Amino acid sequence: MAQLTCPECDAVFTLKTPAEEGKKVRCPEYHYRFVPDDDEPRPKKRQREDDGENDRPARSSGKKKASASLLLLGLLGGGALVLLLGCCGVSLLVYFLWPAGGRGGRITAPVEITADKINRLEFGMTVAETEEIMGGRGQRVDRNEVINTINNIRRVGKPVVNLPGDTHISYRSDNRRMFLGFGNTRSGELLTYAFFIEERGNGSNSNSKMTIGANLELEREKFQNKKNQGR
């Protein structure tokens, strides 16, 4: 609280708050307005400025924290977007380049097809074991497509009317085709037939092996025993 003296009526009165520098105050006696003398108590302007300066770092710190948070969110969002785009790109790459086994309809890279490979195939083999002999994955196709293709290429002998198996895989290289059939068992998909065919002018050269109505679990056991004896 500050005491002031009115220069007009010499009335002494008290201000609840110090008058600011250069501003007039009103005398309560005759309502005369005047600027207090320099020797009158006034608010410490420097102190207010200092207080203001002390406040500024806090506001600046808050802005810096907000900016840092926005930057962090931006980096996280950008990283997630890059990761998503990368996953999509990899998925598309796998879709177009991965062999057709299991997808059906997409042609794989050609592998060398020989009649010798069919002689190395044995009943009871898994899909993975036949792929190792063939040198790659084939294309999964429908049973009727296999039958029609074989009958159209052979042009000689009795037509094929049925093929054992639930899954049918086709390999193709130029004028040569290889078809493998697999039956579903507790041990997985096991080989039940293999058919090699090569177009030659108006005829064909073919080689095949198949088992109809066989117990593929038993064939698998025979194959495993033979494999173990060869080690």
Image: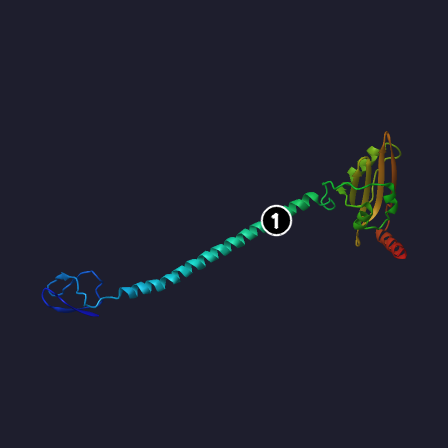
Looking at the image, which residue is at 32% across and 65% down?
50
Q: Which residue is mark 1?
A: 86
Residue 163: give x, y in percent of width and height.
Answer: 83, 42
Residue 61 screen position, x and y as percent: 42, 61
Residue beneath the point at 20% across and 69% down: 2
The image's colour scheme reads: rainbow
Say if 227 sits above or below 40 in the image: above
Q: Residue at x 56, y 52 (%)?
A: 80
Query: Which residue is farthest top?
Result: 202
Q: Quadrant of the N terminus?
A: bottom left
Q: Nearer the viewer, residue 198 or 160?
A: 198
Circle 1: is it few (<14), some (14-19), or many (20+) Cα within 10 Å?
Answer: few
Q: Position of residue 138 (x, y in %)?
A: 77, 43
Above-or-below relation of 162 to 219: above
Name of the residue lying farthest toward the left:
9
Q: Secondary structure at mark 1?
A: helix
